Image: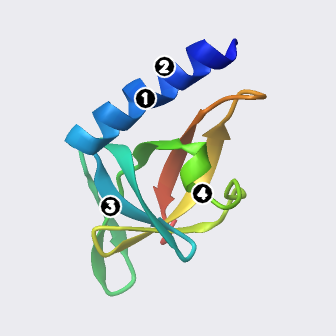
């Protein structure tokens, strides 16, 4: 990808993120990202029911100091998640993370 193309792609993602993004915390770093919530289901756990839906998150990698490892803690709207998978292309600007509730 050329420098000009990369710059245009990053700017387009920033515009989308600024219009539709939400706050999310990877470890101790809070950023604005695009988050897609699957329909939440309820899962019976000790002490009652807990939300059991996964999230999909797209972030501008330059917003993060380091790429979160699988199993890293994530907080979204007061709920605890862990990074279940990540999709990052070599030299890519945007990373995709699947987040699973921390209780599973």
Q: Position of residue 66 (x, y in %)?
A: 71, 59
Q: N-terminal of the two: label 3 or label 2?
A: 2
Disc 4 and disc 3: Cα gap in Å? 13 Å
**Mark 4, residue position:** 64
The label nearer to you, 2 versus 4, is 2
Q: N-terminal of the two: label 4 or label 3?
A: 3
Q: Position of residue 35 (x, y in %)?
A: 34, 45
Disc 1 and disc 3: Cα gap in Å? 19 Å
Q: Identify whether 3 is placed above or below 74.
A: above
Cβ atoms at labels 2 and 1 below 8 Å apart? yes
Disc 4 and disc 1: Cα gap in Å? 16 Å
The structure residue drawn at horizontal position 52% and vertical position 65%, both measured from the top left corner, is 104
The structure residue drawn at horizontal position 30% and vertical position 75%, both measured from the top left corner, is 78
Q: Identify whether 72 is placed above or below 91.
A: below
Secondary structure, mark 3, is: strand
Q: Position of residue 82 (x, y in %)?
A: 55, 63
Secondary structure, mark 4, is: loop
The label nearer to you, 4 versus 1, is 1
**Mark 1, residue position:** 11
**Mark 2, residue position:** 8
**Mark 3, residue position:** 23
């Amino acid at each position: 990808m050329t420098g000009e193309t990369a710059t245009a792609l990053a700017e387009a993602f920033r515009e989308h993120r600024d219009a539709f993004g939400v706050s999310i915390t990877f470890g101790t770093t809070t950023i604005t990202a695009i988050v897609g919530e699957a329909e939440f289901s309820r899962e019976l756990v000790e002490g009652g029911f807990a939300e059991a839906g996964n999230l999909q998150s797209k972030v501008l990698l330059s917003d993060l100091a380091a790429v979160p490892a699988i199993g890293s803690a994530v907080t979204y709207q007061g709920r605890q998640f862990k990074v279940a998978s990540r999709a990052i292309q070599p030299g890519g600007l945007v990373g995709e993370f699947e987040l699973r509730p921390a209780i599973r």
